[in-house]
Each structure stands twice: as C-alpha cells, then as structure tokens.
Amino acid sequence: MLDPKQLKADILEDMRVDLSDEFDRNFERKGFFSDKWKPRAHNYPRGSLLMVSSAMRRSAQGQVSGDGVRFSSALPYTTLHNEGGKITVTAKMKRFFWYKYKQTKDEAWKRMALMKTGKVIVMPQRQFIGDGPDTQRIIREAIDRNLQKFNLSLTEFLRK
C-alpha cells in the first residue's frame, strides 16, 4: 500500500496514459496543443491534415521504460512530419505517384508525378508528439495526483 516502487510505477503509467490521450487529441486540434500546424500547400481532397488513413495517429505508442515514458512509431514518415525536413523526389517516387494517379484520378498525385527528379520538397514541422510547456504541465498533474493519493494512504496508515 505504501510502496515507493508502486508509486513510481503508477506515476509513469498515468503519465503514459495522459500524454497518449493528449498527443492523440493533437490530430483533432491540428496542432501541437495550441500551436497550429502550417496548412497544406494545396487543398487535397484526400482527408484531413495528417489523417488521410489515420495510420500515423494509430501508430504513435507510448511505453514506460526505465525512469520515463517513451513515445515511438513504427512508420518511417512519422519523424519527418513531427520534426519537419526535406524530401528529394526520386524516379521511384514518380513511378509511385503515376501509379496512384492512374488508380485514383486524383490531380494531387498527377502534380506530384510531374515533379522533376531531384526536386527537394520541404515538409514543414507538424508536431504532435514531444516536450513543451503543455507536456510538462500534464506530467506535473500526474505526479501531483499520485502524490496526493500516496499522502492520503500514508495519513491513513499513520492513524492506525
């Protein structure tokens, strides 16, 4: 009942759950908490910003490891979206874009297929996972909640 190891485990698990919920909500907010994402260069009809298939949203997983909580994704493009970066158009990419255009007749795929090989596309940062003031607030709240529960248990134990 008054196990400090259990207190630590409870705090870390609460942090994982609370942060997972908030990072997931960033997709609904279309921003990292109150910092809105930069809009798309073109208005593609294929779905909401960063949520064409929701695969990236579902792939972001938090897990307790050691003395902290770590978030990761198995999808290779998650880091590019979360941190921003540059993509160089390759011949293989162009073939894929043509394939998608023929499959969907979506003009956005055609625009990408017509890009020159070697062109550099700048992907703006659209962060949905990471550290910041809101993340730190959520961590503090999880710690405070668990310490209050622990203090109540300790008070109850000392009264007996």
Image (cartoon, rainbow, N blue to C red):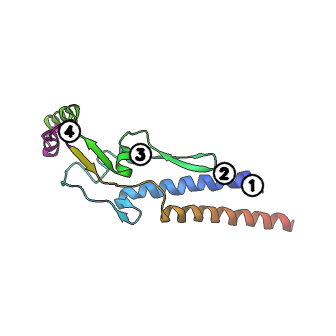
Label 2 SS: helix
Q: Residue at x 57, y 56 (%)?
A: 15
Label 1 SS: helix
Q: Earlier in the sequence, mark 2 or mark 1?
A: 1
Q: Report the residue marked by disc 1.
A: 4
**Are the residues at dot 4 and dot 3 in contact (C-beta closer than 8 Å)?**
no
Magenta segment includes 106: yes
Percent x, y of residue 126: 34, 55
Label 3 SS: helix
Q: Spatial distance from mark 3 to mark 1, Cα to Cα?
A: 33 Å
Q: Earlier in the sequence, mark 4 or mark 1?
A: 1
Answer with left or right where residue 135 lies relative to residue 83: right
Magenta residues, start to end:
103-119
Q: Tell me the kind of residue under disc 1.
A: Pro
Q: Spatial distance from mark 4 to mark 1, Cα to Cα?
A: 56 Å
Q: Spatial distance from mark 2 to mark 1, Cα to Cα?
A: 9 Å
Give the numbered dot on residue 58. 3
Rendered-image quadrant of the N terminus: bottom right
Q: Spatial distance from mark 4 to mark 2, Cα to Cα?
A: 49 Å
Magenta segment includes 149: no
Percent x, y of residue 37: 32, 59
Q: Residue at x 19, y 51 (%)?
A: 44
Q: Report the residue marked by disc 4.
A: 118
Give the numbered dot on residue 9. 2
- Quadrant in the rendering for residue 140: bottom right
Q: Foreground: 92 or 147?
A: 92
Q: Residue at x 55, y 52 (%)?
A: 16
